Image (cartoon, rainbow, N blue to C red):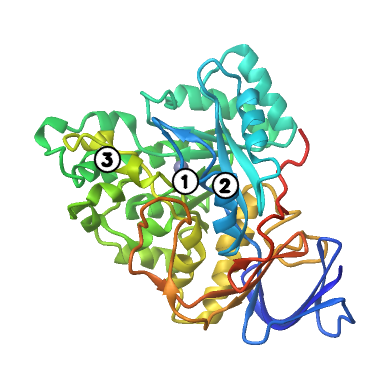
Amino acid sequence: MRTLVRNGRVAAAGRVESADLLLDGGLVSAVGRDLGEAERVIDASGCYVLPGLVDVHVHVGDRIGRFELADGYESGTRVAVKNGVTTLCAFVTQGPGQSLGEALRAARARAAGECHGDVAWHLTPTRFEETDWAEMEGLARAGYRTFKLYTTYRPAGLFSDLGRLESVFRRLGPLGVRFLLHCEDDGLLGSVDASALDLSRASAHARLRPEGAEVAAVEALLALAARHGVPLHVVHVSTVGAAELIRDARARQDVTCETGPQYLWLDETWLDRPDGHRWLCSPPLRGDRERFRQLAREGAFDLFATDHCAFRKSDKDDWDGRDVRTVANGLPGLGGLLHHAWRVFADDPDRAAAEVSLRLAKNPAARLGLEGRKGSLREGLDADVVVLDPNGPERPVRATESDAYEPFPGFTSTLALRHVFVHGEPVVKDGDLVDPAVRRGQLHPNHD
Ligand SMILES: [Zn+2]
């Protein structure tokens, strides 16, 4: 069915203009004026018309440590599309005794037929035998172009030293792979004297993972990636120091970075609350955020992503009360991404719409290698479209609809999701699913 979205302010690729939009056969068919007739006509007066948003950093349908996450593919993509995120990128981590391909097939099976919006995956190898390398190269050639690696988390088997990272860059870089790096220097984390801290307090978590560990790891990884000429994406940047290093490196090499709403709008005083353990995430919440938000306004972050990792309330509270290192580590965020990112630029709605079109659509789609299908409103791209009213009724922002603690209590938004289209079909109207039984999401790459 052809759909005409009329009279809106189209915000795409960082620009805003008054225009109509025609969707046909699941794709954007035209942007402009006098686009003819359509079976379905949407009046977008007073609204921004945006490309479907992309969150490149989401944990759903997975176990982390002892716990099954509260959001699976259905509930994760549901809260996502209801808040404008039509594509999310989750993670596949090779488990013990498992090949990376087996882990990937299991994730795809869990997601199949469940998703309200599109899903892609980053791959994390944890074993590096010759058969593993062959499999990684096969997956890269089959279209899995983003690999996620860690400079810490030794006990979980995720840690890679610089030598390991160098071999990964050397073998997979020539196949067009982009590398996502969790940057905290494991040696510096290990040198913190935990015996000097009161580990029963959540604020000890911030002392255990100091800012300097992030800055040091980013510095080392920038140098290593530059030496091998590979594209680097630094996930969840939390410090001014790391953000400035990456900003300055952009002139020299292909590097991008993300930060999340928690590092923009929450600070470490949340950890001082009696229930401060509920705000535990890594990297931890940091001190004064004013300069960090200023960097965001200056464009230091290519994109915003949530690191959505929703633990059930009972699981988040399931720790011994004595050692903060036993707390489930992560916060939900998907449902708040658009609202918290908009707020960074909210003094000027046109600017906010332009920035969102860039940092929540175009840039993340490009980093995933999906720029030929997602991230903008151009003829031939997927018709994932958000019709956003900036002046809706004020309401609370909700990170998730599942049984998890809300990390942004008291935060509200007036952004109303009038319509969300996925592959040219309406999935959300006035903030609710059009038909909860229908699943329009596709899995990427869309072959096995
Ligand atoms: Zn993460």
Q: Is residue 73 left or right of residue 195?
A: right
Find the distance from the CA under tag 1 to the CA under tag 3.
16 Å
Badge 1 crowding class, 10 Å Cα cut-off, few under 14, some 14 to 19, many 20 or more, is: many
**35 up-or-down from 370: above or below:** below
Badge 2 crowding class, 10 Å Cα cut-off, few under 14, some 14 to 19, many 20 or more, is: some
Q: Is residue 332 left or right of residue 131?
A: left
Which x, y percent locates residue 400?
47, 56
Q: Which residue is mark 2?
A: 254
The reply to whether the residue tagged 1 has its Cβ within 8 angstroms of ligand 1 is: yes
Q: Is residue 172 left or right of residue 425?
A: left
> Disc 3 or 2, which lies upstream in sequence?
3
Front-lying residue, 295 or 304: 304
Image quarter (top left, top right, bottom left or bottom right) of the C terminus: top right
Tell me what residue is drawn at x 40 percent, y 50 percent.
237
Look at the numbered discs 1 and 3 and tell me whether their residues touch, using CB distance below 8 Å. Answer: no
What amino acid type is highlighted by mark number 2? Answer: Asp
Q: Which residue is mark 3?
A: 209
Which x, y percent locates residue 25?
86, 62
Tell me what residue is drawn at x 68 percent, y 18 percent.
134
